[in-house]
Image (cartoon, helix red, strand yellow):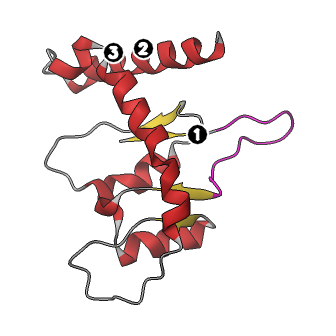
Amino acid sequence: MVATDGEGIPLAFLLAAANHAEVKLAPGTLDRVRVPRRQGRPRKRPEKLVADRAYDSDSFRAWLRRKGVRPCIPPRKNRKDKRRRKTWEQEYKERWRVERTFAWLGNYRRLSLRYERSLVVYEGFFTIACIMICLGRLLK
């Protein structure tokens, strides 16, 4: 799970086993986001969240609204509640930035092949890859 800003820079991530549902890991990932400001506490909440259909859940949408985050999540195809308006379509076009971040992370062979069995070691290499992406974007 990776949370990025509007430019695709990783802000927070959460690694877990592959047998966990993404929608269950999303609140933990969003709780890790800390964006520093010039004065005051770091910003913890994004204005909106652009996510794919895997995150379409009434409980997750309610959690986002309680936090003051506007969800931009397309409804699942098998969703019984067809009343969802298509307000997400225009904002969802920005999803490519997140996919680009995943492509940047895929450039690191050690991450894509997952040589490490230990999650702690893998998390260390994932952190290094995120730092290298941030530095690469800063230097451009």
Question: Which quarter of the rendering shows the C terminus?
Answer: top right
Foreground mark, 2 or 1, reads 1
Q: Identify the secondary structure beneath mark 3.
A: helix
**Would you say the residues marked 3 and 2 are in contact, meaning their CB atoms lie under 8 Å apart?**
yes
Q: Quadrant of residue 21?
A: bottom left
Question: What is the magenta range?
Answer: 35-47
**Would you say the residues marked 3 and 1 are in contact, meaning their CB atoms lie under 8 Å apart?**
no
Cα distance in 3D space between marks 3 and 1: 21 Å
Query: Which numbered dot is residue 122?
Result: none
The secondary structure making up most of the magenta span is loop
Q: Identify the secondary structure beneath mark 2.
A: helix
Question: Which quarter of the rendering shows the N terminus?
Answer: top left
Task: Please tell me which of labels 3 and 1 falls first in the chain.
Answer: 1
Badge 1 is on which residue? 5
**What type is the residue that disc 2 sits on?**
Ile
- Residue 105, how many percent across, how many down? 35, 23
Residue 80 belongs to magenta span? no
Query: Which numbered dot is residue 125?
Result: 3
As drawn, 53 above or below 123: below
Task: Please tell me which of labels 2 and 1 falls first in the chain.
Answer: 1
Q: Quadrant of residue 117?
A: top left
As drawn, 113 above or below 67: above
Query: Which numbered dot is residue 128?
Result: 2
- Residue 8, how many percent across, how many down? 52, 34
Q: Residue at x 35, y 73 (%)?
A: 75
**Would you say the residues marked 2 and 1 are in contact, meaning their CB atoms lie under 8 Å apart?**
no
Sort mark 1 into few (<14), some (14-19) or many (20+) by Cα contacts within 10 Å. Answer: some
**What type is the residue that disc 1 sits on?**
Asp
Q: Nearer the viewer, residue 33 or 129?
A: 129
Q: Identify the secondary structure beneath mark 1.
A: loop
Cα distance in 3D space between marks 3 and 2: 5 Å
